[in-house]
Image (spheres, rainbow, N blue to C red):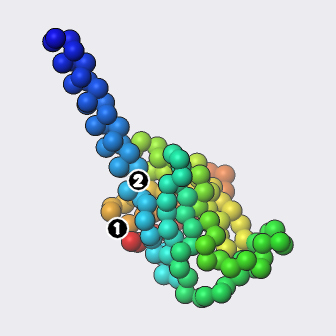
Amino acid sequence: MKKVCSLILVLFISATAAMAQKSIADIITGEWLTAPKDAKILIYKEGNKYSGKINWGKTTGRKDDKNPDASLRSRELLGIVILKNFVFNGKDKWEDGTIYDPNNGKTYSCVIKLRDNKTLEVRGYIGFSMFGRTEIWTR
């Protein structure tokens, strides 16, 4: 009986830890205002990865006219996915993702770090993360 209780306790603790890990990883989900305050990005979870799409923009009807794919240049920016494939590293970052910049049509490697519940640090880069640009997004 003592072994069964010990096993149940271990399983309960493991399940609780897994749920806590999940809620920590999901903390970035929701709507974020970009640094220039010209767009809101909705970050959401798909499977075990995180993505983000343009949910609002100051310039309604703006097209993706800088896209390197000519067939996509006529689409509106509202609703396009600009953050893709982010994975929570188990600590404080979401890594291995990309960010698309509709202002120049380029896609960069990206790391997201949560500073606090209301502040995201979004760093796009080419090659090494030390060669890039960081923006601060707010809830």
Residue at 71% over, 82% down: 63
Mark 1 or 2: in front is 2
Image quadrant for the C terminus?
A: bottom left
**Residue 99 relative to residue 37: left or right:** right
Q: Pick whichever of labels 1 and 2 is earlier in the sequence.
A: 2
- The number of numbered badges drawn on the structure is 2
Identify whether 41 is placed above or below 24: below
Residue 51 in which image quadrant: bottom right
Q: Position of residue 92 (x, y in %)?
A: 40, 49
Where residue 62 appears, x then y in whole percent?
A: 67, 85
> Separation of disc 1 and disc 2 at Cα?
14 Å
Q: How crowded is mark 1: few (under 14 residues within 10 Å), some or many (20 or more)?
A: few
Residue 124 visible? The answer is: no
Query: Mark 2 falls on what kind of element?
Result: helix
Dot 1 falls on a residue whose secondary structure is loop
Count residues near mark 2 (Cα–Cα under 10 Å), then give few for <14, some for 14-19, many for 20+: some
At a point 45% along the width and 50% down the height, the residue shown is 93
Q: Mark 1 points at which residue?
A: 118
Tags 1 and 2 in contact by the CB under 8 Å rule?
no
Q: Which amino acid does label 1 sit on?
A: Lys
Find disc 2 in the rendering and name its residue: 26
Taking the view exactly as shown, the residue that stands out farthest to the front is 1
What's the mark number on residue 34?
none
Q: Is residue 109 visible?
A: yes
Q: Where is residue 132 in the image (x, y as percent from the top left)?
A: 60, 61
Which of 92/7 is in front? 7
Which residue sits furthest right?
70
